Image (cartoon, helix red, strand yellow):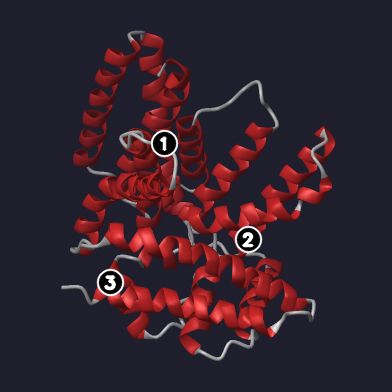
Amino acid sequence: MKDNSPLLIISLPFAIGVFTSLYFPASGEASLLYYGTAIGVLLLADTIFLFYANTYIKVITGSLLFFCGILSGIVGKCCFEGSGQPDFILQSSLALKNAILELPIKDKDAKGLILALLCADRQELSAEVRAVFRASGASHLLALSGLHLGILAEMTRKMLLPLGNSPAMKIIKSVLIISCSGFYTFICGASPSLVRAFLFISFSNINSLLPSRKAPAVNCLLTSCLIQLSLSPKVIESISFQLSYLACTGIILLYRPLANWYPIQKGLVFRVWKSLAMSLSCQLFTAPLVAYKFKVLPKYFLLTNLFAIPICEALIYLSVLSILTSALGICPGALINVTQRCALLLINLLEKISAIP
């Protein structure tokens, strides 16, 4: 934990301060109750940091960052609402949606699913299909996140492999991957979970260029949280932001210990176990918030994720290839057919899981 202590001392009190700002009115005079709450939380935070850091400098730093978080949250509520996107971002978003809608895929649900997976636009999805995703515990697949952006970043990396691995090419490839990921994040609405994923991809690519300084995953988590809260304090109110960071925390803390429980660290069974460990580590951290917010918990989330995520990954790959080849005018009918069948396979699978009593 020593390596992470500076980031922890910076990000944790700032995040607590931003969270505390939710209880301050956006306008008018704050009552004594609000200030009393802030002072109480500050004293609690100081006590924790004094016990952890054992130095007054770190306690004072934590206190200042806590108040900076409160101030940042209040300013964010008052001043930074309703900002629009540049025209070229909106036009690019519309162009991507049109490219998907123009694919010669006959089944409406299949095309609607592709639109939802790549653009987070569920308007073309029927109410029945959305209900199936909800009942089976696969709604997270329709919300753009690290899963989707990670697949697209990996596709970009593979397409850039012919450039070689010279030091100059490594830098160029990292810049292109970060740029493409950032552009996609913005044209898809820059949801909190997508921004978090973009920051992780950026840190990962920068880290790959610095082999002598490997940053732990927890450092990336703390840094991305600090950046998001600094740029947009109101994001802490977003359920997408909360679930995204809870899921990442679960993966960082639980995935490796759970995966290592299986005695034989190779083979198909171990790969299945790793997939289950990943789902379980996410679910254990996100389930309480999901139950509180939505009053429901999926019963078969392990079964759903075990089968649905690989199919979803394949569908994203096929959909992107279909879009690119269609734009070039060389899309084979077989590719369109396989893409449609893959989408329908995912829907049919979730229908069967949701029908389990």
Q: Is residue 78 above or below residue 13?
A: below
Q: Is residue 162 above or below residue 190?
A: above
Front: mark 3 or 1: 1
Name which quarter of the figure residue 270 lies in. Answer: top left
Residue with the mark numbered 3: 353
Residue at screen point 56% across, 44% down:
199
Q: Position of residue 191 (x, y in %)?
A: 49, 59
Counting residues from the start of the chain, the first of labels 1 and 2 encountered is 2
Residue at screen point 67% across, 66% down:
89
- SS for tag 3? helix
Counting residues from the start of the chain, the first of labels 3 and 2 encountered is 2
Q: Looking at numbered disc 2 in the image, what kind of residue is underneath it?
A: Tyr
Q: Looking at numbered disc 3 in the image, what kind of residue is underneath it?
A: Ile
Residue with the mark numbered 2: 184
Frontmost residue, 28 versus 239: 239
Circle on res. 265: 1
